[in-house]
Image (cartoon, grey):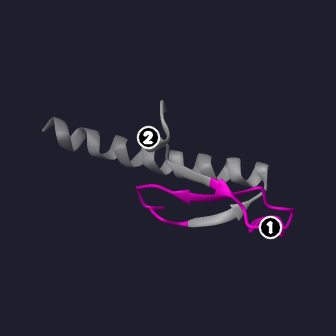
Amino acid sequence: MSNEFQRPVSVDFAPRNSVCEWCGKPAERQLTAIGGSYHNESGVFCRTCGELFTQGVANALSAALLAQAPQQQQ
């Protein structure tokens, strides 16, 4: 992905004293999914959980694109 407009997730700083929604560690980033089935879902995450969230969103978008590809060839 070459620029921020083509990324599956937007990244912002987490509000001060936030904790990760998945593990409870201090949160570093607020992530919001862009497009796909997770569109506009967001949360605050530590680095590790944020990477997992981003990968999950990217995988969902890839699966959706692959599912649409055969329909477009018809």
Q: Which residue was labeled with disc 1? A: 16
Where is residue 33? Give x, y as percent: 51, 57
Q: In the orientation shown, which residue stands out farthest toward the left?
A: 74
Quadrant where the C terminus sits is top left
Residue drawn at (58%, 65%) of the image:
42
Residue 37 magenta-drawn? yes
Q: Could you tell me what secondary structure mostly forms the magenta stretch?
A: loop
Work out whether residue 48 or residue 27 is closer to the camera in this orientation and state it: 27
Tag 2: residue type?
Answer: Gln
Q: Residues within 10 Å of mark 1 (few under 14, many from 20)?
A: few
Q: Which residues are magenta?
A: 12-41
Q: Residues within 10 Å of mark 2 (few under 14, many from 20)?
A: few
Mark 1 or mark 2, which has the lower sequence index?
A: 2
Residue drawn at (70%, 53%) of the image:
50
Work out whether residue 48 or residue 69 is closer to the camera in this orientation and state it: 48
Label 1 sits on a secondary structure element that is loop
Where is residue 57? Give x, y as percent: 53, 52
Work out whether residue 61 or residue 39 is closer to the camera in this orientation and state it: 39
| Residue 1 numbered tag | none
Residue 34 magenta-drawn? yes
Q: CA distance from mark 1 to mark 2?
A: 28 Å
Quarter of the figure with residue 14: bottom right
Q: In the orientation shown, which residue stands out farthest toward the right?
A: 25
Residue drawn at (78%, 49%) of the image:
48
Q: Which residue was labeled with disc 2? A: 6
